[in-house]
Amino acid sequence: MNKNKAAVAGKSRDGFTSSFGVLAATLGSAVGLGNIWKFPYLTGTNGGAGFLIVYVLATLVVGLPVMIAEIMLGRKAKADAFTTLKTLAPAGQPWWVISVMGVAAAFLIMAFYSEVAAWVFAYVFKAMGSSIVTHDPKVTSAAFGQLISDPLQSLLWQWLVLALIAGILLMGVAKGIEAVAKKLMPLLFLLLLVVGARSLMLPGASAGVGFLFHPDFSKISAGVVLTAVGLAFFKLSIGMGTMMTYGSYFRDDQNIPATTLRVMCADLFVSMLAGLAIFPAVFAFGFEPAAGPSLLFITIPAVFASMPLGHLFMVVFFFLTAISAVGAMLSLLEVPVSVISGRFHMSRVKATILTLLLLLVVGSGCALSNSSMAGFKVFGMTLFDLFDFCTSNVLLPLGGILLCIFTGWVWGLDRTRLALSNQGALNNQGLCRLLVFLLRYVSPLLILVVMLKGLKVF
Ligand code: PFF
């Protein structure tokens, strides 16, 4: 039996060992800086509640079907994303191109994501001192500015983060990814609840709640909708083979639609909690909601500064945010590592080291985007902004469209039914029909129109 066939047969493959482990690891990929850093700052810069509504709709209509499809295909083939698409597609059809785009997306996302994670790690230590425990927006902004404009600090923290991720990946799927996620996810939920509650109790917090929940539809433009769709993809880690790779570690008796729905709801819940931790404080202390990527780093210290034992809570908060970033980065790196080791018959150790070395190069460009390379711009964007824009607004939606077409039209209803019902053990025929309908007609067209309109193609 050749390697691919062995992979398809699922022999001696590392994988998730329990239902809770599957849930925690998948959630560990979805929940991350996307919830705590990206969602709040995009909501802030795109007008608040209106953006939130579009984002939730995008998650339901586009995100959920694509996520179910990816996990289903991954579990079927039990292989890396490239091999999965190659084995499941009819001979000669190059659907594997989705995984090539996915590997590119993984590198580009990791390049800027690991830098934001680097800031979070640095903040764990900054929070231990007292320099950032203040309500004064000028002081928190200056502290953040000083960190990101120092090339040496930016690089060192990023390299530290990358080394940590590589170390965990080397431990494997069950002992590395699953074990870390299982322990730390519940803790993150708990702490976000505490911080959210405190932020809501601040005098003047209601303006922030209004910003998050009272929509102003005049603020919704094509660009805003594209950003929301991009965020839905980024949040659920879809459109690039990540969920396909994780799907390959799913157990055969796992109920895929139910697990996916749970992950999606929990992920939305974490974003909501992060929004409730941040926006009431933004308005209570007179910060700027449209501050952009620095929002988390200048408002959260102020929330903690206003609560008893805030100092301690802030250390724990940034620590947990760092951990959530680790879960997401593990899944991001898992895509190139599994494709490289699968395709080139390289050991996992070698593939991880190779990926890491490549990332050190690509990532440094992002780490230096606020200092030595601030003047280096492509289409008017620094590398950090460019990579962020291209992945969320182009690569992930494009991967999503292709995945919809592949699952809806090539893979088809019958195989979807069989795969999602666990060979008939589950009774979910109606759901499968709805899913295939969405994947065939609704999701790809919607993404395409939004993408072209958002990019101002028409
Ligand atoms: N979903 C992660 C987050 O929201 O932080 C980011 C992410 C992880 C994106 C894995 C893409 C991916 F493949």
Image (cartoon, rainbow, N blue to C red):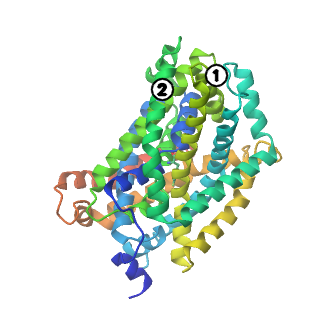
Three-letter residue code for mark 1: Glu
Is residue 340 something that shows in the picture?
A: yes
183 vs 270: above or below = below
Which of discs 1 and 2 lies nearer the camera? The answer is 2
- Residue in the foreground of this view, choosing between 10 and 201: 201
Return the mark for residue 248.
none
Amino acid carrying label 2: it is: Gly
Q: Position of residue 394 (x, y in %)?
A: 56, 51
Residue at the limit of the structure toward the top, as seen here:
203
The residue carrying mark 2 is 196
- The quarter of the picture where the C terminus appears is top right
Image position, residue 220 (x, y; %): 50, 29
- Residue ID at (48%, 16%): 201
Note whether 140 is above or below 457 in the view shown: above
- On the image, numbered disc 1 is attached to which residue? 288
Element class at badge 1 = loop
Position of 52 compared to 124: left or right? left
Q: Quadrant of the N terminus?
A: bottom left
The crowding category of the residue bearing disc 1, from other C-alpha atoms within 10 Å (few below 14, some 14 to 19, many at least 20), is: some
Residue 289 visible from this viewpoint: no
- In the depicted structure, whether residue 372 falls above or below residue 136: below
Left or right: 421 in relation to 1 = left
Q: CA distance from mark 1 to mark 2?
A: 18 Å
Position of residue 222 in the picture relative to residue 302 (left or right): left
Q: Position of residue 94 (x, y in %)?
A: 47, 72
Foreground residue, 288 or 22?
22
